Amino acid sequence: MKITFMGAGSTVFARNVIGDCMCVPSLRDSVFALYDIDAQRLEESRTILEAMRKAKGGYGRIECYVGVENRKDALRGASFVVNAIQVGLYDPCTITDFEIPKKYGLRQTIGDTLGIGGIMRALRTIPVLKDFAEDMAEVCPDALFLNYVNPMAMLTGYMLRYTPIKTIGLCHSVQGCSKGLLEKLGMEDRLEGRKELIAGINHMAWLLEIKDKNGVDLYPEIKSRVDEYMEKADADDKVRMDYIKNFGYYVTESSEHNSEYNMFYIKSKYPELIERYNIPLDEYPRRCVNQIESWKKEYSELLEGGVKEHERSNEYASQIIETMTVGGALQIGGNVLNTGHLISNLPEEACVEVPCLINGNGIYPCNVGPLPVQCAAMNMTNINVQLLTIEAAVTGKKDHIYQAAMLDPHTGSELDIDTIKKMVDDLIDAHGNWLPKYR
């Protein structure tokens, strides 16, 4: 079996996903094809993964493919394709996504999922995914595309609506959602045997139900503890806790993410909210710089001291691949099209995050029914932007980029329409060849 990893220069993530596969007896004999456009980053990944492979007993084989001209060979005959690319990287594109909006008074925290940063990232990435899909249709038409790249809903939604490639979007925010909440609120004794239902959209999927092992609803106790938690000066999850207070439910992704998915918390007229909710502005650029430096140090230490033992992570990829090839059953939180109204009060063309059952025959998304009306309304403020951004990428019309930015809840609440259009034009000009031409 062949497992291809696109964007293998993302060494830490490639190490986790492929390392997980090396931990599974039924997968360790696979061919692991690594693809990237950066030869140096790819070589670093190959070095680490080859050392891991030998430490695990020398099973399987690692192959490397550099550059667009070798992409088809990397994909040829693959059964599974894992996507972890970042088009334009931190420098220059993420820097551009943050610095130009700042000139217009628009501040961001992460900028990779929604907002003007998420829009630009999608517009850079969708053309590359289109090329991937065309190559896959030719050389591995039956492969499953496991997308880990943000903006998750926009990219996965594009692949599912506009390409023939079987695709599922995967994120790690579902796995740790309820555990993190209960631990923050001092309810660790309720973790074992808990039951939960999570559904919505990526990064804003709602913890709709959470019960302990005896079937007792934990939300009343959770809500009774929120105010005390919010009073802590150093608390780090205040936006999501505020969601519980005002919308009744907790969401999957972090407060630094969710602080920019709405019109409530990052407001130039209310600067005190930044401190009140501990919102880390410019967080993603800061993480990028730290990650680049920490990887240089880690890589040097690994070369000198050897590769540490890898234990299987909680990432879904290896679990899905194992289940689909060996058999058995698995439930995950997956990003899929809302076909047949899995969530009945969201549009069918939306990409939703719902429980999905996996077995040897494929992926079976579960019908959830309607979300609480306020949760669906919050999701729709994000879905509007997602659908318009995909429309812009597919049609090449600049008006749809303007409209996506205008309807983005954070951007639209801070800037007027003329300013939004000027900012979009500046971003398009600054990105240059990283973006296709729009009319």
Image (tube, rainbow, N blue to C red):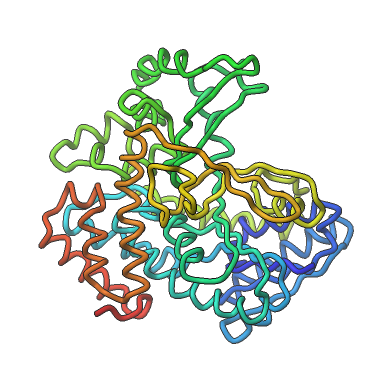
Residue 240 x, y percent position in the rendering: 39, 32
The correct choice, above or below, for 220 with respect to 406 in the image is above
Question: Residue 279 appears in which quarter of the rendering?
Answer: top left
Residue 210 x, y percent position in the rendering: 53, 24
184 and 374: which one is in front? Answer: 374
Residue 297 x, y percent position in the rendering: 60, 55
Residue 92 x, y percent position in the rendering: 38, 69
Question: Residue 1 appears in which quarter of the rendering?
Answer: bottom right
User: What residue is at 58 percent from the left and 64 percent from the top?
Assistant: 83
User: Which image quarter holds the C terminus?
Assistant: bottom left
Residue 238 relative to residue 407: left or right: right
Residue 77 relative to residue 206: left or right: right
Residue 42 relative to residue 158: left or right: right
The correct choice, above or below, for 170 with respect to 97 in the image is above
User: What residue is at 33 percent from the left and 67 percent from the top?
Assistant: 391
Residue placed farthest to the bottom in the image? 69
User: What residue is at 62 percent from the left and 56 percent from the top?
Assistant: 12
User: What residue is at 79 percent from the left and 56 percent from the top?
Assistant: 22
